[in-house]
Image (spheres, grey):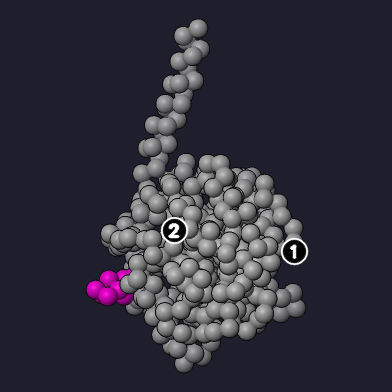
Amino acid sequence: MLRYNIIPFLLLLFSEISMAQKTSLHLIDKLATSETKALYKNLYTLSQKHILFGHQHATEYGHGWSGEEGRSDVRSVTGSHPAVIGVDFSGLSGRSQNEIEKTKTLLRKTITDTYNRGGVTTVSWHFNNPLSPGGFYWIDTVSKASVKYLIPGGEYHNTYKEILNSIADFVKSVKGKDGEPVPMIFRPFHEFDGYWFWWGRNHCTTDDFVSLWKFTVSYLRDSMQVHNLVYAFSPDNLFSSEEEFLERYPGNEWVDMVGMDNYGDFGRYGEYDLEAGYKKLKIVSDFARRNAKLAAFTETGLESIPKKDWWTAVLLKTLKRGDLQLCYVLVWRNDTKSTTHYYAPFPGHVSEKDFILFFNDPFTLFESDLKNIYK
């Protein structure tokens, strides 16, 4: 009888020891700056009991305003900026040099201000197709399946290197108040499992996508000596198993953080499948813990937020359910002019009171809650 009782105990013990060994986190960049290493480790520590709240373009513009110093819609409601602020590298290529320089100036200020206040920056890259018109979206009549031309051996590989040179120069130019490079979570080629971007699964092979990812990381890190990036891998929600989630995964030596973008299961088009949303987050979280990676809910939200208790009854309820360990959740942007395209509340919005409950929950962290995250 004793033998059968002790075996489950020993299995559990060995499992916990194995998990503890595997959670020795380290960045894939061995030369990462001290601030970047500290951010990575602190995000992991905080994720064990909390989650940071993020909002895309939060301080650049909001519902009915743009470019106002110190403002965000989230701060107008809660008194604090989001803990994580999303920006985009979309304006750093495919435009006139004058436009690119203006974009760099504004973007540099946004990222630096966030860092100096103690907040975190995550960077998406709506990368305009360098070989055809149509921007970053796939348009059947004009878009070119460009990935195979940009990777090593491709006809336009040098063109891609020139683009990455510009990205690298910019990233290295963003300095904190003491002259240190500002850490950023870099999330290139997101939602690659969909068809809507030119780097999506319908427009390149798995091998070509993995080659693009590996070259991007190695060129920035090793050739251009960029050492202040955390590299995040984030498909959309078009998976239902870990095998599907990892279909285009380049390997642990090429990724620091895994995540997921998911609007569909959380109310888009008026439909909810919270059970599916939770299970997908669990796949991401479980994989991260087994492989010593950070996990995040890299994009979500409900456009216009018509459900007045969406923050607590949908988002918070899901995030606090089960055994999830996610370092941040980010909702999408608030457009300046549109009366419907926004994902965070503003004063007077129907979900404002519920968002304050979300803000006050000890589980969620905003910028005012962060202390020395870079030390």
**Along the line of sight, which residue is nearer the eye, 71 or 89?**
71
**Amino acid on which the number 1 mark rests in the picture:** Tyr
Residue underneath mark 2: 365
Q: Residues within 10 Å of mark 1 (few under 14, many from 20)?
A: few
**Along the line of sight, which residue is nearer the eye, 74 or 331?**
74
Helix, strand or loop under label 1 = helix
Quarter of the figure with residue 166: bottom left
Disc 1 to disc 2, how far (Cα)? Answer: 29 Å
Which circle, 1 or 2, is nearer the viewer? 2
**Along the line of sight, which residue is nearer the eye, 303 or 27?**
303
Q: Is residue 308 rendered to the left or right of residue 251?
A: right
Image coordinates of residue 98 in percent, x first then y, are: 46, 92
Residue furthest to the top in view is 1
Region in magenta: 175-182
Q: Tag on residue 269?
A: 1
- Quadrant of the frame with the C terminus: bottom left
Q: Is residue 331 visible?
A: yes
Q: Residue at x 71, y 55 (%)?
A: 272
Q: Residue at x 47, y 10 (%)?
A: 3
Q: Residue at x 40, y 40 (%)?
A: 22
Q: Is residue 269 rendered to the left or right of residue 167?
A: right
Q: Residues within 10 Å of mark 2 (few under 14, many from 20)?
A: many
- Location of residue 66 with respect to 145 vertically, above or below: below
